[in-house]
Image (spheres, rainbow, N blue to C red):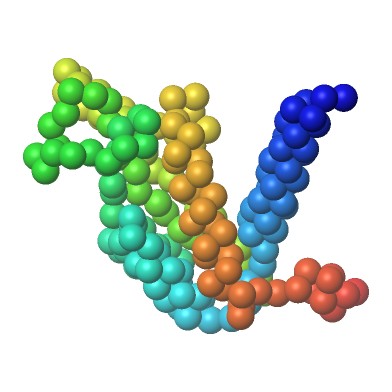
Amino acid sequence: MSLRFASIVVGLASVALAACASSAALRAAKDARYAGPRSAMLEVVAETVNARSDLRVQRLELERGLVVTSGTGRFLDGTEEPRADGSTTRSLVVTRFEIALVGSANGYRVEVTPVMLLRRPGYPAPVPLAAGDPQTPGWVVGKTEKLTLAIYDALADFRVDATKTASAAR
């Protein structure tokens, strides 16, 4: 085996291991359960969102257990929209996030959902994009995953150990 081929194989293996590790971390974040006062957890989520340079909390709904971010526009390739008036000659995706604490005091889980509108030049109205739509740019998926992981880390004090919960239920 040539040295070049061996280095390519090692490089690909490293990428695969990193993807598995990040995939496992994302799965843990999505499956995590939290216990405690919902209002306190929502405040932590809001602080986490506002600590990011690219997002701001637009609305905090304590009764519904929901944090809604303001929308930001980016081109399909992920670059930021440069015009203040919102006009452009390229398609633009305006994205906001809804972060919900779902469940009850016995165990909440966090759902991070992107809400997207696709603005196309020459079209009078934006087109809603559902999560998982084939037109959804990859950067939206990455941004959603990063936000999910940041919230998972921020809510560590509220996290419930699944093994303790299972044994307590018996």
Which residue does the image show at 50% across and 75% down from the upper left?
41
Comparing 31 with 74, the one in front is 74
Q: Is residue 125 left or right of residue 153?
A: left
Q: Is residue 103 left or right of residue 24?
A: left
Quadrant of the image containing the C terminus: bottom right
Residue 71 visible in the picture: yes
Residue furthest top as drawn = 122
Residue 65 screen position, x and y as percent:
46, 66
Quadrant of the image containing the N terminus: top right
Please identify the quarter of the rendering in which residue 34 is found: bottom right
Residue 64 screen position, x and y as percent:
43, 65
Comparing 33 with 78, the one in front is 78
Please identify the quarter of the rendering in which residue 109 is found: bottom right
Which residue does the image show at 72% across and 37% down from the upper left?
11
Residue furthest left as drawn = 85
Which residue does the image show at 68% across and 56% down from the upper left?
25
- Relative vertical location of residue 128 with respect to residue 28 in this rendering, above or below: above
Comparing 53 with 34, the one in front is 53
Residue 12 screen position, x and y as percent:
73, 34
Residue 101 screen position, x and y as percent:
52, 64
Please identify the quarter of the rendering in which residue 156 is found: bottom right
- Relative vertical location of residue 22 with respect to residue 74 in this rendering, above or below: below
Which residue does the image show at 48% across and 34% down from the upper left?
138
